[in-house]
Image (cartoon, rainbow, N blue to C red):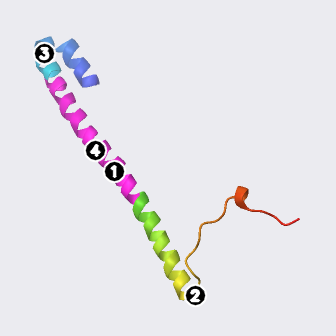
Amino acid sequence: MFGIAYVIVAKTESAAVVLESMASLSTIWAVGLSVLGIYVFKRSEDKKITSKDFIEDIVEQVASQIKIPKAQKIQSRQSIKFND
């Protein structure tokens, strides 16, 4: 940014070319960073799905080795009834 400011102040005959160049570069950077942002977002979702499936597979393999039936959903506190 200091370089651009220097060209505008010290070499005003080149200022128009520099500003036009920066304008065209900003469009390219906007598109590139948008694509990168979408890629990172989708990759993060893929990692979450993969890690969840991987953990479930490991738990099932361990449970089958020690002969425990597949894990059932844990009941919520509201559905548990206590005998008084």
Horizontal side, residue 53 vs residue 12: left or right: right
Which numbered dot is residue 16? 3
Query: CA–CA distance between discs 4 and 3?
Result: 30 Å
Q: Which residue is mark 2?
A: 66
Q: What residue type is disc 2 on?
A: Ile
Marks 2/3 in contact by CB < 8 Å: the verdict is: no
Q: Quadrant of the C terminus?
A: bottom right
Q: Position of residue 69 (x, y in %)?
A: 57, 81
Q: Position of residue 47 (x, y in %)?
A: 39, 59
Tell me which secondary structure the magenta stretch mostly adopts: helix
Residue shown at 72%/55% (left/top)? 78
Residue 42 image label: 1
User: Is 17 left or right of 6, judged from the image as shown?
Assistant: left
Q: Amino acid at mark 4?
A: Leu
For the N terminus, the quadrant is: top left
Q: Magenta stretch containing residue 34, yes or no?
A: yes
Mark 2–mark 3 distance (CA, rounded to whole Å): 75 Å
Q: Nearer the viewer, mark 2 or mark 3?
A: 2
Segment colored magenta = 21-47
In whole angstroms, how far apart are the C-alphas of marks 1 and 4? 10 Å
Residue under label 4, please give it.
36
Q: Compare marks 4 and 3 and give the one earlier in the sequence.
A: 3
The reply to whether the C-beta atoms of the residues labelled 4 and 3 are less than 8 Å apart is: no
Q: Above or below — where is 57 with respect to 11?
A: below
Q: Quadrant of residue 43?
A: bottom left
In contact (CB < 8 Å): disc 1 and disc 4:
no
Q: Is residue 15 left or right of residue 52?
A: left
User: Disc 1 vs disc 3: Cβ atoms closer than 8 Å?
Assistant: no
